[in-house]
Image: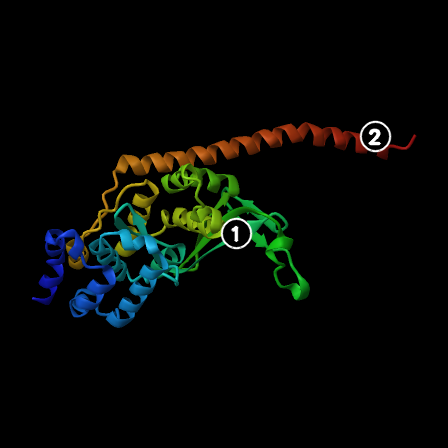
Amino acid sequence: MALQTLKNLNRAQAVQPAQQVVTFPAMLEKYKSEIARALPRHINPDRMARIALTAFRMNPKLGECDPRSIFAAIIQSSQLGLEVGLMGEAHLVPYGNQCQLIPGYTGLMKLARQSGLVQDIYAHEVRENDRFTLKLGLERSLEHEPLAGPGGFPASDEERGEVVGFYAVAVFKDGSRTFVAMSRKEVERIRDKSPGYQMAKRNKRASVWDTEFVAMGLKTVIRRLCKYLPKSPELAMALALDTASELGKPQNLDLNDAINGTYAPVVEEEEVEVIEADQAETQGQEQQQQAQQEQQAQPQGQEQEGQDEQLAVPF
């Protein structure tokens, strides 16, 4: 009966007059016991309620969202095992009058580790004064040595220079590894195609890409790495939620589906293929540019080598 009461929020809230619409904090308090029964057993309902209220108060725009969609996002996040807000595992983001659940890169890494097949997963930015070596082919390798400061510890970000790229590494249970690396240009091209970023620029507002570029770059490379990893249902769901957001599509989080564990974001396969095609095109363009630069540099190097040999011959 308690769960049915919570599910009836969809109908009850819809028929209330506009002046009697209950706010999210009020609903959170009123249906606290029902929410506890809707959560997975490993989730502490009191902790979830505190985290949800904190996340809600951090973003005033959430006050303009339908509180049922915020409820659905909170329960869906709990179903995935992610905490919203300050931990960065997931975020509540307004989308019109609806609340969307956006997984953070720490949340994606957490779900990858919890799949049982990935022992470790991590990502780093590379700066222009770091030493970075990437080799592909039959013997792939990736080496990153940040610029050292006093005592051998990494130097400050200012000393290391501007960010030039990102990489992510996954370590499997058997000790084998896989990785992906992306240049800054490649990450920025993906950013520029993001509907949220485009909207912020049209409205002359700062986006999360402007305020947290490194974090967004890390998330971009982690998300690409996750495509090549064995996925748990939770990781697959988190990636689908994130893809819907990247496409600028409403997630249409439904409270009943979230409670029943049957929610699934609708993302057309063709749209996903467009994203992947854009990314593949970006990689192809960068590889072509690199090859052209190497071809242009080769004659210069050969000419210089010939000059050096002439200087070495005694008269």
Closer to the camera in the image, 10 or 188: 10
Inspect the image, locate mark 2, and give the three-letter code of the amino acid beneath it: Gln
Q: Quadrant of residue 2?
A: bottom left
From this viewpoint, is residue 16 visible?
Answer: yes
Give the x, y percent position of residue 234. Answer: 27, 56
Which circle marks residue 310 in the picture?
2
At mark 2, the secondary structure is helix
> Which is more N-terminal, label 1 or label 2?
1
Q: Which mark is residue 280?
A: none
Q: Is residue 87 left or right of residue 73?
A: right
Q: Position of residue 29 (x, y in %)?
A: 21, 68
Camera-side mark, 2 or 1: 1
Crowding around mark 1 (Cα neighbors within 10 Å: few <14, some 14 to 19, many 20+) is many
The amino acid marked with disc number 1 is: Glu
At which x and y percent is residue 214? 49, 51
Horizontal placement of 302 versus 213: left or right? right
| Image quarter of the N terminus | bottom left
What residue is shown at x 40% (from left), y 54% (from top)?
Answer: 105
Of all residues shown, which one is farthest toward the left? Answer: 1
Helix, strand or loop status at disc 1: strand
Instruction: Give coordinates of residue 196: x percent, y percent.
Output: 37, 42
| Residue to which mark 1 is pinned | 125
**Residue at left 25%, top 38%?**
268
- Asked if residue 92 can be seen in this view, the reply is no
Q: CA distance from mark 2 to mark 1?
A: 44 Å
Residue 146, picture quadrant: bottom right
Dot 2 crowding, Cα within 10 Å, few <14, some 14–19, many 20+: few
Q: Residue at x 19, y 66 (%)?
A: 35
Q: Is residue 298 left or right of residue 77?
A: right
Of residues 81 and 83, which is closer to you in this image?
A: 83
